[in-house]
Amino acid sequence: MAKKSKVKKKTSNTSKEPVNTKLSIPKKEAVGQDNRIGMHFDVSASFKREYKLYALQREMSMLEIFKESFALYKKVYPPKEGDR
């Protein structure tokens, strides 16, 4: 019977402390114009191209278009009673 050799797996956390895998969201006062966090979501290549072209034609950033779009959306579809 062949002898099994034990292979010790290397771990990046050598301090034996638990690793926090939860998403960390900064406090409200920490989020501002200079301290942004990313919003990551996938869109099709054609949508991104159209969105970027729309922003360029108006000499606006994609972020400015996104913010204005959301503001308009909130006006058209205001939060329901009890929503936060």
Image (cartoon, rainbow, N blue to C red):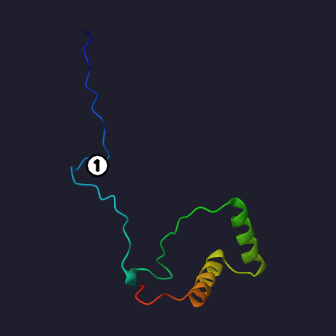
> Which residue is label 1 attached to?
13
Of residue 32 and residue 68, the one placed in the foreground of this image is 68
Q: Position of residue 26 (x, y in %)?
A: 38, 75
Mark 1 lies on a secondary structure that is: loop
The residue located at (76%, 82%) in the rendering is: 58
The residue located at (25%, 47%) in the rendering is: 14
Q: Position of residue 15 (x, y in %)?
A: 22, 50
In the image, residue 41 above or below residue 77: above
Q: Amino acid at mark 1?
A: Asn
Image quadrant containing the N terminus: top left
| Residue positioned most to the top | 1
The residue located at (22%, 54%) in the rendering is: 17
Q: Position of residue 7 (x, y in %)?
A: 28, 28
| Residue positioned most to the front | 81
User: Pointer 1: residues within 10 angstroms few (<14), some, or many (20+)?
Assistant: few
Image quadrant containing the C terminus: bottom left
